[in-house]
Image (cartoon, coloured by chain):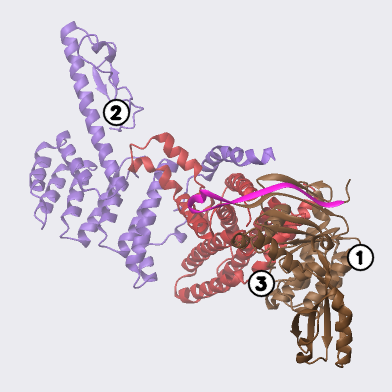
Chain colours: A purple, B red, C brown
Amino acid sequence: MRVLRALPLLLLALVPSVQRRVDASRGAFSGGDDTLYLWSGAQVRRLAPGLESLLADVYWLRTVQYYGSQHAFEGGGGYPLLGPLIDITVSLDPRMEIAYRYGAIFLSEHAPQGAGRPEDGVALLERGVAAQPDNWRLRQDLGFYTFLFLHDAPKASRVLDEAARLPGAPAWLRTLAGDVLLRGGDRATARRIWEELQAQALDPAMRGNAWAQLAVLDALDEADRLTGLVQEFARRTGRRPASLEELVPAGLLSRPPVDIYKVPFAYDPGTGEVTIGRDSPLHRPR
Amino acid sequence: MGSGRLTRIAAVAANTFRESVRERVFYNLLVFAMLMILSGLLLARLSIRQHEKIIKDVGLASIDVFGLVIALFMGVSLVSKEIERRSLFPLLAKPLRREEFYLGKFAGLALTLATNVAAMTAGLLLTLWATGATPDLRLLQAVFPLVLGHLLVVALALFFSTLSSPTIAAVATLCLVVAGRLSDVVRNARTVLPDAPAWLVEAVYYALPNFRNFDFKDRVAYGEAIPAAALAWVTLYAAVYVGAVLAGGVLAFRRRELH
Amino acid sequence: MNDAALEIQGLAKSFRVGFLGRKTRPVLRGLDLSVRRGEVFGYLGPNGSGKTTTLKILMGLLRPDRGSARVLGEPLESPAWRHRIGFLPEHPYLYDYLTASEYLDYTGRLFGLPAAVRAERARDLLGLLGLTRSASLPLRRFSKGMTQRVGIAQALMNDPELVLLDEPMSGLDPIGRHVVRDLIVDLKGRGKTVFFSTHILSDAETLCDRVALLRSGELLRVGRLDEILSVDVAHMEVLVSGVPAGALERLPGVLRRHAVGERWRLEVEERGLGAVVGAVGTQGGHVLSVQPARQSLEDYFFNEVVASGSLDQAWEAGD
């Protein structure tokens, strides 16, 4: 039967298109609306005496899976269950450092990387600091996020200083605490912080996020550099360039002005300012 | 398909079902019943709602796991046992073609699975009712896709067992099931491995049997309704993939020499 | 031309052996065979000669490397003839969770027989094979001989024109063998063709019209038994009783004697026959039978095999 021989391949060829339809039709998992079905951490604790660690692990895995699948499939969508899942995890095991750190970053980050609720992220870290007062890393993260997301440099500096005094804290943390206070919204400080977070990251998603933040800083630096070149062009020719390409024949630029995702930088001839392209994954709202 | 063909396939399917009844495949129901009773009794001190969620979670997870175990272990021995014991030989001398036998065995095991799952679902609903919770018929929206997933496991197990020993077939099928359940990880691979080429990740994602498609357990346990379109597309996916694997299996089985 | 129930032409098959299947071992080397309708045909050969392989190729369990066959006039690949034949494999394993009746019923369904016909035939066949009382027992509880008989029953459910049996007497006690022998004779009487393989030559001697002798995958001889086995009229076989051993020694013309229980089988030259018969009578004994000394199939076979110096070859393992 010739038909039979072709059948498996023919059917398998249909699979990708059907799968796409399946993915589209499943819709976002709204999940947390019905609070009757969602437990608090305290309830779960009562449920499983003696099994807290195990359950904490289970919930931790679910959290990671939840974040991963939401990120991939639903494009974020606010991650409504992230908070409750983390809450249950740390209620079951208040010593699970990674849960606090992971939860904090993805609660705080802007959409679509995170839930965009830095207050929740910071609150989570405060809970972690209360549960583990001698853990320098949690306090460090609290300081970092207070600075990066809440833009409260004085408070951040104070917290970092406390962290620097804890056992096991590295020497550079003290210096960094000082820099945060002195230099305020300095990009270099932010870069240092993200580099630390990337180096300390235990989880691939966290590391990936830190890497992405550093890429944003690099792109901001590049945008500033291009702005500088525009000014140089204006000084030489007496006018602003109509587009960034004009910088190339002028010998100021040797390669096309695109970021690492190959998205061109945006240029406003009116102000002479170069910024990250709006379509770029690196673009961040002000 | 001629009526003769259908009669023969049905005869093989009926006999396969009869075998599973007599060989006591349904003993898992006893374990399931115990699980339901235990969770019903032990959790009585919690409020009704939490009680309900746990029973649903435990019930759906058990149905999933038991179904998977039956599909896998019966699937790999379905045809290979007949070849090994040579019980197949007198049958193939009859006007029974190899593909009729193969499809009949598949249908028989599908029937066994469906019956088993139906019994477990009834037990789950009964437990819910007996503990004062509502026996939520929307649970069927989660159970139906689970069965589709199990059928895919059977098809895969059958296919591999035609090519090699039952043990290797079981391992291969299990690997595919695990990988298929991690399909979201595969899809997100680039967050962990940014250097992986996008076309490769996509190809692997589509090629693997996507068992997450069949998992609506969480949603249903949270009381969320599943859109009919989603169920329809998932059913189509199962039909296409199962069809492909069965066709491949038939081809392999027809070529096999039976010593 | 089709009064041939079975025609085989140039059938050849080799198996792969050794690590990675690099070497091949030929099991059938170009077989040519023809079985006429209505005859009882014996397919004989030592273990490993290729008998079962031949049957498996005919049933579609194996694919031949070369050659072709026709069954009841239809080509091998055609599904049409399967409604008209019955097959018993060697050491049949039937589903042990079914009863004998259920198994036959299943068999009947695969033939597309209606329910009433299935029930009736199953009853008749089980009765014929002495299994009526065990009909409702699960096959798991059957002895080897009983299973073998069910195996024969399932081969006959569709009232086939051609019956192929691989070692039908295997596992049967003397009563069972008697039943099966009678069955084969009965089938022949009803115009069926019976093709059976065996390595027990005495069965073939009593039942077959023609035989084929197979050795190492090649056909040694095909033909009627009385053509193959030479009859030696120069010697007679005389069975006697009631004669003391001492007296026998003095009888002239007795070439050999074997004790058979209380009787003696004497091999006597033809010209001395009269004297021997008379002497036995004088001693008060009885002559029970006189017949020409015929070479047995076993002797023939053994001679052929030894003559060609291939005793080892004849006993290759696996069929």
Q: Which mark is residue A260?
A: 2
Q: Kindly identify the residue that appears in the image at 24 percent across and 20 percent down.
A: A273
Q: Say the numbered circle drawn on residue A239.
A: none
Q: Measuring from the top left, give residue A42's x and y in whole percent.
A: 35, 66
Q: Residues within 10 Å of mark 3 (few under 14, many from 20)?
A: few
**Where B9 sits versus A183, above or below?**
below
Residue shown at the point (57%, 67%) measured from the top left: B124
In contact (CB < 8 Å): disc 2 and disc 3: no
**Residue C224 shown left or right of residue C44 in the figure:** right
Q: Please, what secondary structure does the residue beneath circle 1 have?
A: helix
Decide: few, some or many residues near mark 2? Use Cα within 10 Å; few <14, some 14-19, many ≥20: few
**Circle 3: residue type:** Arg
Q: Which chain is mark 3 on?
A: B
Name the residue tied to disc 3: B22
**Is residue C10 part of the magenta span, yes or no?**
yes
Q: Position of residue B111 (x, y in %)?
A: 66, 60
Residue range of the region highlighted in magenta in the rendering: C4-25
The residue under label 1 is C189
Name the residue: 50% across, 75% down: B38
Above or below — where is A149 with respect to B128?
above
Instruction: Judge depth for marks 1 and 2 and give the one in front.
Output: 1
SS class, disc 3 = helix
Q: Is residue C281 magenta?
A: no
Q: Main secondary structure of the magenta part?
A: strand
